[in-house]
Image (cartoon, rainbow, N blue to C red):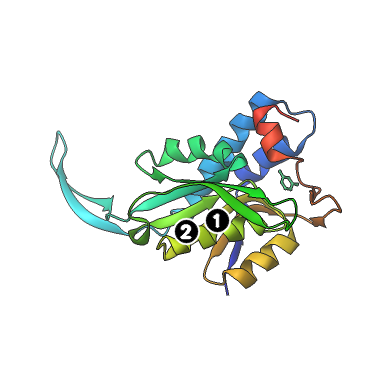
Amino acid sequence: MGKVYVFDHPLIQHKLTFIRKKETGTKEFREMTNEIAGLMAYEITRHLPLRDVEVETPVATAQCKTISGKKLGIIPILRAGLGMVDGILELIPAVKVGHIGLYRDPETLMPVEYYVKLPKDVSEREMIVVDPMLATGGSAIEAVNVLKRNGARNIKLMCLVAAPEGVDKMKEAHPDVDIYLAAMDERLNEKGYIVPGLGDAGDRLFGTK
Ligand code: URA
């Protein structure tokens, strides 16, 4: 069964508090979302394997470490996932970025793909799906379906805030996918919003309604 990790780093928690506040404006919301995403990327990459290298400093030969060729990819789910990309790229500038766009069919209520563009070697990469909110789980489950259909074998999901309902659905649908969060909230309300959550992440990121 997939594991769920909630990052309790004080900087992540402090910034999350800031973006939860309803009076936080678009500019600050966007900046802090990216900062949290960067901090979470720092935590999520702790396991990356290192190899020994020798470099010449201006003074002497130094025995050093370098990341040993582990390939990463991040996949923002459109559109709110875009709000996490720059923060991750600041830390891991060479990471490949794919995109998955999904909408909910008004009749079946099922997520439908309208845009998929992935790195060509997804089967060799550790793919991190990013979306600020894990609410019902529908989009994240479908995004992972898309990745698996395209050959991905090593997938993680990184969200800022989750509802237990979405986490349970995700674990059931994709037990091989670990979930990384900044917070696990109380529940979903009748409109599908996470409570207490932070509202509509896409609207708050892009200043729409
Ligand atoms: N999507 C959001 O942006 N916010 C929620 O609370 C739930 C889904």
Query: Which element type, helix, strand or loop, lies under badge 2?
Result: helix
Identified at 34% across, 51% down, the residue is: 120
Q: Provide residue 85's location: percent of width, then percent of height.
A: 50, 39
In this rendered view, identify the residue nearer to me: 110 or 75: 110
Q: Quadrant of residue 201?
A: top right
Outermost front residue = 107
Say few, some or many: other residues with alpha carbon within 10 Å of mark 1 (under 14 / 14 to 19 / 20 or more).
Answer: many
- Return the x and y of residue 108 as percentages of the image width and height: 73, 58
Amino acid on which the number 1 mark rests in the picture: Ala
Left or right of 98? Residue 83 is right
Tag 1, which secondary structure? helix
In screen coordinates, is 135 left or right of 65?
right
Q: Nearer the viewer, residue 28 or 78?
A: 78
- Dot 2 surroundings within 10 Å: few (below 14), some, or many (20 or more)? many
**Circle 2: residue type:** Leu
Left or right of 190, for residue 165: left
Q: Is mark 1 within 8 Å of ligand 1?
A: no
Q: What residue would you read off at disc 1?
A: 143
Residue 117 percent coordinates (x, y) = 44, 46
Tell whether label 1 touches label 2 (CB within 8 Å). Answer: yes
The residue located at (76%, 46%) in the rendering is 197
Say if residue 60 shows up in the picture. yes
Q: Quadrant of the C terminus?
A: top right
Give me the residue at 46% from left, 48% from top. Answer: 74
Q: Which residue in the structure is indicated by mark 2?
A: 147
